[in-house]
């Protein structure tokens, strides 16, 4: 019997019990759609992180006070040994430094004439806009002279501007108060969106000279971080080693003792985050794949019921000359058609659900051809795997006993 005829007979057999076929395929539909959506969410998160890393600038090295990375061990930011002189030493002794910005942050309430907003006040040098490739929408950025004299000037992120002065406004020249001290607004930065760190919005910030944060807002001499932009073609790995060597010498850290700082590149940061999202993607896809397994068991169950219901039909076909292989292929093709039909509908449903999440819920979801191929391939494999036993059972029936079956 030809494959085309076998497929035709399989489709006709499934159509005889359309409702049962639809309910059986439902498990496969849900399973395939769930796998596609979960992989799309994970891939979207990874793509979003990579894009956010790119918007932060290129060839970036960050030096943070404390031995921890981020919140790890609570070390970062807790140490106060990092000083502006350390940044000057790095610029003087480490080849390849293009731009550099010492940093010191403080989260506080910022007050305008008719509104107030709790936001991140980021102390930086005038070179931070070059490091982060961050142009201004209105006004200008503070200068080296402003940094040297600790001037009370500020540049607003777009979110902070919207909350303090209204969406899209130009507050250049206006006065805001930070910890009851007046600051003149010099300009507004263009919108950049979420940062690579979860929960942080780059635009929800007020940038001021780091010396102003030291002298006027916190009354300290230390800084919490140094952001460095390397020259094009510079070897970042060698630069991080040289920076660490300079800081260990300046901080009098003996061999074998732990650093009181951490030096990281954005590549390391991106690798860590994407590795985490990849692991989560696989975990989510594995959980969703359980529904594929349940769908496969449903297919096996319904095919066994079909074999029992059609025992006399099978016996009649065998008695008039059909081969065991013909019977096996008929039921196996039925299982494959059932799983592939469910897989195709599941793929369409997965695309629709991913689009809905991106459009309505504003989640980052990216459907890749690999995820579609994997889901569809799994559906076909499940049809073959769970359909073989019922098909083999049908082909193994004795024609005489089958014809006697009531």
Image (cartoon, rainbow, N blue to C red):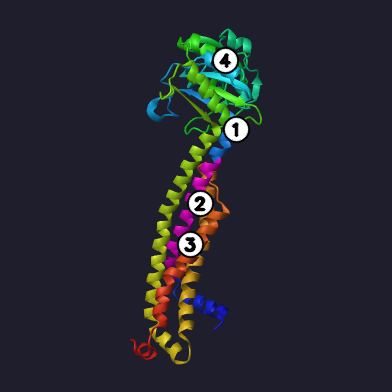
On the image, the x and y values in percent for residue 142 come to 62, 15
Please say if the residues under marks 1 and 4 sit with CB atoms less than 8 Å apart: no
Whether pointer 2 and pointer 4 mark residues with C-beta atoms closer than 8 Å, the reply is: no
Earlier in the chain: of badge 2 and badge 4, it is 4
Secondary structure at badge 2 equals helix
Residue 112 visible, this orientation: no
Distance between the alpha carbons at the discs numbered 2 and 4 = 53 Å
Q: Main secondary structure of the magenta part?
A: helix
Residue that badge 4 annotates: 88
For discs 1 and 4, the disc positioned in front in the rendered view: 4
Distance from disc 4 to disc 3, alpha carbons, whole Å, reads 58 Å
- Residue at (44, 88) in percent of width and height: 318
Q: CA distance from mark 2 to mark 1?
A: 28 Å
Which secondary structure lies at badge 4?
helix
- Label 1, on which residue? 55
Range drawn in magenta: 21-47
């Amino acid at each position: 019997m030809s494959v085309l005829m076998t497929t035709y007979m399989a489709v006709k057999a499934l159509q005889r019990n359309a409702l049962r076929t639809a309910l059986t395929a439902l498990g496969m539909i849900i399973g395939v759609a769930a796998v596609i959506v979960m992989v799309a969410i994970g891939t979207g998160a990874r793509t979003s992180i990579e894009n956010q890393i790119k918007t932060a600038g290129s060839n970036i090295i960050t030096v943070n006070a404390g031995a921890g990375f981020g919140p790890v061990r609570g070390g970062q930011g807790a140490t106060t040994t990092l000083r502006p002189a350390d940044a000057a030493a790095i610029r003087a002794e480490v080849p390849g430094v293009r731009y550099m910005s010492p940093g010191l942050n403080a989260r506080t309430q910022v007050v305008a004439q008719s509104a107030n907003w709790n936001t991140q006040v980021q102390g930086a040098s005038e070179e931070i806009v070059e490091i982060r490739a961050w142009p201004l929408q209105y006004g200008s950025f503070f200068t080296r002279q402003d940094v040297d004299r600790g001037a009370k000037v500020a540049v607003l992120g777009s979110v902070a501007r919207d909350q303090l002065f209204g969406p899209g406004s130009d507050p250049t020249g206006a006065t805001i108060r930070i910890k009851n001290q007046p600051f003149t607004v010099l300009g507004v930065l263009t919108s950049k969106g979420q940062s690579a760190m979860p929960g942080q919005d780059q635009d929800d910030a007020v940038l001021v000279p780091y010396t102003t944060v030291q002298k006027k807002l916190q009354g300290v001499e230390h800084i919490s971080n140094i952001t460095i932009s390397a020259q094009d073609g510079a070897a970042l790995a060698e630069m991080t080693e040289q920076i660490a060597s300079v800081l260990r010498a300046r901080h009098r850290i003996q061999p074998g003792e732990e650093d009181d700082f951490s030096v990281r590149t954005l590549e390391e940061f991106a690798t860590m985050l994407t590795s985490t999202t990849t692991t989560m993607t696989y975990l989510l896809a594995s959980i969703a794949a359980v529904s594929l397994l349940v769908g496969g068991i449903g297919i096996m169950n319904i095919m066994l019921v079909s074999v029992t219901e059609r025992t006399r039909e099978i016996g009649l076909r065998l008695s008039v000359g059909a081969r065991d292989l013909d019977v096996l292929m008929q039921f196996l093709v039925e299982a494959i058609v059932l799983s592939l039909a469910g897989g195709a509908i599941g793929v369409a449903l997965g695309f629709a659900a991913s689009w809905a999440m991106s459009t309505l819920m504003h989640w980052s979801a990216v459907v890749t051809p690999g995820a579609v191929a994997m889901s569809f391939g799994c559906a076909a494999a499940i049809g073959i795997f769970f359909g073989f036993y019922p098909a083999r059972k049908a082909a193994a029936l004795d024609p005489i006993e089958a014809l006697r079956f009531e």
